[in-house]
Image (cartoon, rainbow, N blue to C red):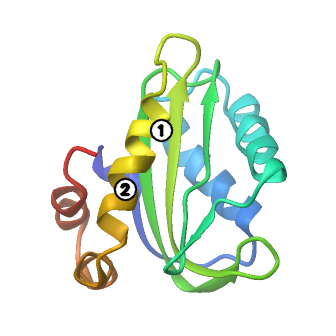
Amino acid sequence: MSGEIVMFDVESDSSEEIIRLIADAMDKDDRLIDKEGYITDVMSREASSSTAVGFSIATPHSKSVYVKRPSLAFVRLAKPVKWDGTEEVDMVFQIGVPSPGQGDRHLEILAGLFRKVMHDDFREQLRSAKNAEEVIELIGMV
C-alpha cells in the first residue's frame, strides 16, 4: 500500500461517492488502466450483494481487467454513511485486483482483513491512527 491510498476524515454522503473517491486515488497512483471501467466493476459487485461486513466496515472490491496491480485502499470517514441503505459504515477498505492472472488474490486480501477486523483493538487502532504509516503498519501484509 502507498500513502496516497490512505485517507482520513473523508466527508461523503454515499457509498458510490466513496468508491469513486478511492478510484480517483488509485488512478492517480497509477494502479488503474481505466478508472470508469474499474468503478463500473466495483458497483456491479456492490449490486450483487452488500460489502458492509459489520463492525462499521465495508469492503468494496472487484477483480477487474482495469486494474494494473493488486491494490488496497483505506478510508476513515468523518461521519458514518449508510452503506447498503441500512448498515452504517465509518471505515472502508477497497480492493482492486487484476483479472485474469491473480486467481483468488482478492479473497486472500479479504480473508486477511476479516481476521484482523474481528478484533476490537485493531478497529480502535484504525480509528485513532494519526497518519498513513500507522494504518499501513496495522494492516501489514494481508
Vertical comparison of 120 with 94: above or below = below
Q: Kindly give the residue lying farthest to the bottom in the view shown.
A: 79
Callout 2 secondary element:
helix
The foreground one among 27 and 129 is: 129
Q: Which residue is mark 1?
A: 107
Vertical comparison of 105 with 25: above or below = above
Q: Which residue is mark 2?
A: 113
Q: Kindly give the residue lying farthest to the top in the view shown.
A: 101
Callout 1 secondary element:
helix
Left or right: 28 as drawn, with respect to 116: right
Q: Position of residue 77 (x, y in %)?
A: 52, 78
Vertical comparison of 86 with 7: above or below = below
Quarter holding the N terminus is: top left
* Residue 126 in view: yes
Q: CA distance from mark 1 to mark 2?
A: 10 Å
Which of the 4 quarters of the picture holds residue 135? Answer: bottom left
Q: Position of residue 40 (x, y in %)?
A: 79, 38
Q: Residue at x 71, y 73 (%)?
A: 83
Left or right: 57 as drawn, with respect to 7: right
What amino acid is labelled 1 in the image? Leu
Q: Residue at x 59, y 46 (%)?
A: 24
What amino acid is labelled 2 in the image? Leu
Q: Residue at x 22, y 44 (%)?
A: 141
* Residue 29 in view: no
Which of the 4 quarters of the picture holds residue 80? Answer: bottom right
